[in-house]
Image: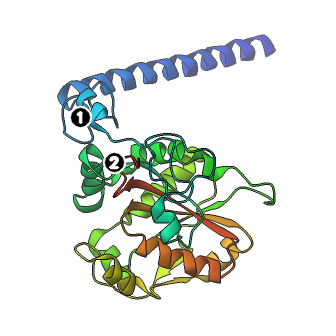
Amino acid sequence: MAGSEAIADGNRSGRRGGDGVLARVFAAAGRRALDLLLPPTCLACDAIVGQEATLCPACWDGMPFLAPPWCERLGLPFAYDLGPGALSPQAIARPPAFDRLRAVAAYEGPARVLVSRLKYYDRPSMAGAMGQWMARAGSELFVPREDEAGPPVIVPVPLHRLRLWGRRYNQSGLLAREMGRAAGLEVAPQALIRRKRNRQQVGLDAAARARNVSGAFTLTPQGLMAISGRRVVLVDDVYTTGATVGAATRALLREGATAVDVMVFAHAGADTPLG
């Protein structure tokens, strides 16, 4: 009797294994059929590409990726290596509230298109690839310093609740989530809130931007617990004058963060290496 039960169990296991193989075969066939009907397209120009969530060769070649050597504080590229800790004239003239800024690319060409599509054209799925690029570009920000007990916590720049209601998602929150997932770091998506509904920053000069976001950010109770005694990596989609991340940085430092670094996808003004 025991032998018969063993044979029956073996038959059932074999059927389950066979069912799993068939399921995988059918799933792969379904994906191939879907690719034929709806082939993956370039994130920036919609040309057909070989796999999802990538750029076509032309857009990849035109992507203004940033890489060292760069300003230690602002991440602005240098035309030649000035040595460790070199600072740009901009960082010397107006030292930012945060410690370091890093970005994937300059805010032009395909990078500008990607930000626009994510932010204004209801394409939240683009945050996956963009967040992974940010995780690679900002890897130095994620390494604990000698005086730190552990890695930093990731905090996105928030939208005001009314703007969030209209857009349905916070692009910075999506980027922070995907970047944190790729880097294996804690994300505190509700740490900061925007208590003032400011006018949009687009079209404002640096001074007007600073006035517009002055006092705009505060910490939630959960945020106070998440950032207390820790370094924060603040995430936004674009860095322009620094007014927004500056105001958010001051709120974080005021409420207990030990330091703040900034990670963005695109950096306006970083298109030409400093000579």
Q: Residue at x 51, y 41 (%)?
A: 68
Type of the residue with mark 2: Thr
When the figure is inspected, residue 139 is found, relative to residue 57, above or below; the finding is below
Image quadrant where residue 7 sits: top right
- Residue 138 image point, x, y percent: 54, 48
When the figure is inspected, residue 49 is found, relative to residue 192, above or below; the finding is above
When the figure is inspected, residue 51 is found, relative to residue 198, above or below; the finding is above
In the picture of the structure, the residue carrying the numbered disc 1 is 41
79 lies left or right of 155? left
Sequence order check, earlier mark of 2 and 1: 1
Residue 193: tell me if it is visible.
Answer: yes
- Residue 103 image point, x, y percent: 45, 51
Choose mark 2 or mark 1, whichever is in front.
2
Q: CA distance from mark 2 to mark 1?
A: 29 Å
In the picture of the structure, the residue carrying the numbered disc 2 is 272
- Residue 147 image point, x, y percent: 81, 60
Residue 158: tell me if it is visible.
Answer: no
Callout 1 environment at 10 Å: few (<14), some (14 to 19), or many (20+)? Answer: some
Image quadrant where residue 109 sits: top left
